[in-house]
Amino acid sequence: MKYLVTAYDKKSEEFAGEATLSGVSPEFLADLVGVPVGQLLNAYPLDESRLMKIAEKIDLKWDVGACDYFLEVVGE
């Protein structure tokens, strides 16, 4: 599986970008969104507190005023 944070512009709702979460464990992500790791599928909205927890693991900056963010799980 591949784990991404995707961003969508709050005004236009258009796709604004994505970041691959390589090096972040599925267990961490499942715990973050509150699902068992075996059920970590589809997309999950990420609020600012969840984004900050991800930021502790990887070096990314978020613009929560301009974009809505989601954790997306896709097959490789």
Image: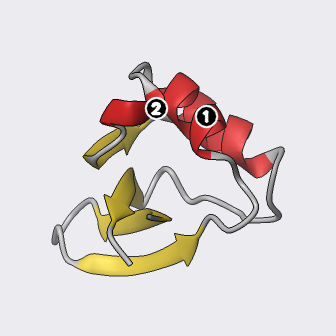
Q: Secondary structure at mark 1?
A: helix
Amino acid carrying label 2: it is Val
Query: Which residue is nearer to you in this view: 21 or 55?
Result: 21
Quarter of the picture holding the N terminus = bottom left
* Residue 8 drawn at (x, y percent): 30, 67
Instruction: Please identify the quarter of the rendering in which residue 23 is found.
Output: bottom right
Vertical comparison of 51 with 11: above or below: above
Report if the CB atoms under discs 1 and 2 are less than 8 Å apart: yes
Residue 42 is left or right of residue 3, and the answer is left
Name the disc covering residue 27, or none: 1
* Residue 14 drawn at (x, y percent): 20, 77
N-terminal of the pair, mark 1 or mark 2, is 1
Instruction: Residue under label 2, please give it.
Output: 37
Q: Residues within 10 Å of mark 2 (few under 14, many from 20)?
A: some
Kindly identify the residue that appears in the image at 47 percent across and 76 percent down.
18
Query: Which residue is nearer to you in this view: 49 or 9?
Result: 49
Tell me the CA gap for discs 1 and 2. 6 Å
Instruction: Please identify the quarter of the rendering in which residue 58 is found.
Output: bottom right
Quarter of the picture holding the C terminus = bottom left
Residue 33 is left or right of residue 31, and the answer is left
